[in-house]
């Protein structure tokens, strides 16, 4: 990583590459800064995947119902995604390092309270508090990174490493969670956040500089309120749709409130003279197309992982630890591919790499949709690894396109937009694909209900989930294996349909990327393109970054 540190060179003197007005001490320790930011990111990603393997323990020890389990997971997501635009804007104004440090502390407090929870309701509340911390951490990491790495080529590589750590968190979460649950209680999955958070907090004091928007516009409380109401209501409808029904009063009212709130947010931001999010950013095709690519990539990733976790644990009978270990090749492939994507962008350009990545994801999902209940591990994981290659090729270049197309002083809210699209895409993937799988599975159970004498409450339980069907099968004596086999096949039929829908959606994203993303090849990443960009309009015309100067304080303890 240090091979690029060879002085500013002639182009840097022209102001197109190098670190410009960045303090030399900040520039010299930028890779240590990146390591600290990646560790901070790891806390968030790892926590979510750890919690997934703890769900059976929460049922046994806290007596959590299916609805409560859903909100233990989704309460965090709802608060996290709803606050991202607001916390990103606050970081731009008051300091991104300050936001990062407060976020880590809030996340740690929420982890302690979650570990000490004595009921599902308490755990839902404390997980929501962790969502507040996560909303402060996530946009801060990417916006600080963007301000520390001024050379477009180095920034692309740094973002690729940052994205790779998301893959590492996906891999570590289930393995660490499974290990902890084999030796300790469910609360251990929250206690583990404390040492990681402490290390990130201490390292941040020394290696992370303070950055903020030097223009410091007035706060936009109306915009903040509208964004929270709009995003939160839409996400609530997405989360509740599969369980309550997409046409239920609660879901339709929530969706309507969310859409009206977001439309009002857009109207207000276009009207006010101090917007939290400058809507003209979306006029830049590089910014908008990249966000679409990120959204639909996470649609595919979250939706497929949601299904495949159940496939391994229910259909193949893996324990949580075994499921986590068996998913390691998938996550490690993503972690390795993401940093390599920056080098490919330098040779092929953003448009080609993102389009190839999305097309690879789509093809892998189509092939994966042909698996059966008795398909071998090698066949399934090989297809998942191909999918991971596509995700690694897509996420980092698309994220760099988002961040590189914005003025540097707006990096916080720009990062928040990128993070919001990730969360909304992921929630949509789980909700839409999950709903489709549930309906196909229920129809499959109805087809065999008469054969096994299923009726009434027992039929409702078996139709409800594959896990419940496998529990009921134990009580069926000699017919139990046949019922379990029928339930497994019904689930895999639904899984196949869900993966095909995901493949079509991602192929649509590939078309958007190919049509609207600029090439941004070798010349751009070397800093040759757009040597005099000073505004967003100039950036759009040049397909280059529109980074204005920013305030970057070198003091370690600032």
Image: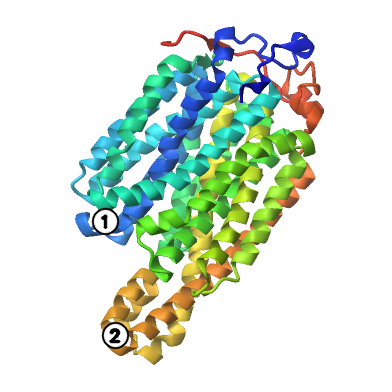
Q: In the rendered image, which quarter is residue 449 located in?
A: bottom left
Where disc 2 sits, the SS reads helix
Quadrant into which the N terminus falls: top right
* Image location of residue 80, percent across then percent down: 43, 39
* As drawn, 66 above or below 491: above
Residue 45 has which mark? none
Query: Residue drawn at (43%, 20%), measured in percent from left and top?
Result: 204
* As drawn, 557 above or below 312: above
Q: In the rendered image, which quarter is residue 136 located in?
A: top left
In this orientation, which residue lies closer to the viewer: 73 or 150? 150
Query: Residue drawn at (60%, 24%), measured in percent from left and top?
Result: 146
* Image location of residue 54, percent across then percent down: 32, 53
Look at mark 1 in the image and give the residue it sits on: 57
The residue carrying pointer 1 sits among few (fewer than 14), some (14 to 19) or many (20 or more) residues within 10 Å by Cα, namely some
Instruction: Describe the colour scheme in one phrase.
Output: rainbow
Farthest-out residue, left: 118
Residue 109 visible in the displayed image: yes
Query: Residue drawn at (77%, 44%), measured in percent from left and top?
Result: 352
Look at mark 2 in the image and give the residue it sits on: 476
* Image location of residue 371, percent across then percent down: 56, 71
Q: Earlier in the sequence, mark 1 or mark 2?
A: 1
Residue 519 visible in the displayed image: no
* As drawn, 321 above or below 440: above
In this orientation, which residue lies closer to the viewer: 266 or 348? 348
In this orientation, which residue lies closer to the viewer: 100 or 229? 100
Question: Marks 1 and 2, how far apart in space?
Answer: 25 Å
Q: How many marks?
A: 2
Query: Residue drawn at (66%, 13%), measured in percent from left and top?
Result: 19
């Amino acid at each position: 990583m240090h091979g690029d540190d060879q002085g500013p060179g002639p182009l840097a003197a022209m102001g197109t590459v190098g670190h410009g007005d960045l303090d030399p001490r900040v520039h010299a320790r930028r890779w240590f800064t990146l390591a600290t930011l990646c560790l901070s990111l790891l806390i968030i990603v790892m926590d979510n995947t750890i919690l997934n393997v703890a769900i059976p323990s929460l049922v046994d020890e806290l007596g959590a119902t299916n609805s409560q389990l859903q909100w233990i997971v989704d309460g965090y997501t709802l608060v996290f995604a709803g606050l991202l635009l607001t916390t990103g804007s606050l970081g731009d104004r008051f300091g991104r390092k300050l936001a990062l440090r407060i976020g880590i502390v809030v996340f740690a407090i929420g982890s302690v309270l979650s570990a000490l929870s004595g009921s599902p309701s308490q755990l839902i509340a404390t997980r929501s508090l962790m969502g507040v911390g996560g909303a402060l951490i996530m946009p801060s990491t990417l916006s600080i990174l963007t301000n520390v790495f001024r050379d477009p080529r180095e920034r692309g590589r740094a973002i690729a490493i940052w994205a790779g750590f998301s893959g590492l968190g996906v891999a570590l979460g289930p393995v660490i969670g499974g290990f902890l649950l084999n030796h300790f209680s469910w609360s251990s999955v929250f206690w583990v956040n404390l040492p990681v958070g402490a290390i990130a907090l201490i390292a941040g004091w020394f290696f992370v500089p303070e950055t903020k928007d030097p223009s410091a516009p007035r706060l936009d409380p109306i915009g903040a309120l509208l964004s929270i109401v709009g995003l939160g209501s839409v996400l609530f409808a997405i989360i509740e749709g599969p369980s309550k029904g997409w046409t239920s009063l609660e879901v339709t009212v929530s969706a309507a409130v969310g859409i009206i709130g977001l439309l009002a947010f857009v109207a207000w931001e276009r009207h006010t003279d101090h917007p939290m999010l400058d809507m003209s950013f979306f006029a830049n095709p590089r910014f908008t197309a990249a966000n679409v690519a990120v959204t639909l990539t996470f649609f595919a990733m979250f939706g497929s992982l949601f299904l495949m976790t159940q496939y391994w644990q229910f259909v193949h009978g893996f324990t949580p630890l075994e499921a986590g270990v068996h998913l390691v090749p998938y996550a490690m492939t993503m972690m390795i591919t993401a940093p390599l994507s920056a080098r490919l962008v330098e040779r092929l350009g953003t448009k080609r790499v993102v389009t190839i990545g999305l097309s690879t994801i789509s093809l892998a999902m189509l092939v994966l949709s042909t698996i059966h209940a008795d398909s071998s591990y090698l066949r399934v994981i090989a297809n998942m690894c191909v999918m991971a290659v596509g995700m690694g090729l897509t996420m980092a270049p698309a994220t760099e396109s988002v961040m590189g197309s914005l003025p540097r002083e707006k990096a916080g809210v720009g990062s928040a937009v990128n993070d919001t699209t990730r969360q909304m895409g992921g929630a949509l993937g789980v909700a839409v694909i999950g709903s489709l799988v549930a309906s196909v599975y229920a129809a499959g159970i109805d087809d065999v209900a008469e054969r096994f004498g299923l009726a009434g409450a027992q039929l409702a339980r078996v139709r409800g989930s594959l896990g419940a069907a496998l529990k009921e099968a134990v009580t069926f004596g000699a017919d139990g294996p046949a019922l379990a086999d029928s339930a497994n096949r019904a689930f895999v039929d639904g899984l196949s349909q869900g993966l095909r829908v995901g493949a079509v959606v991602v192929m649509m994203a590939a078309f958007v990327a190919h049509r609207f993303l600029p090439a941004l090849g070798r010349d751009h990443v070397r800093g040759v393109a757009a040597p005099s960009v000073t505004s967003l309009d100039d950036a759009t015309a040049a397909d280059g970054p529109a980074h204005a100067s920013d305030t970057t304080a070198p003091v370690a303890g600032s």
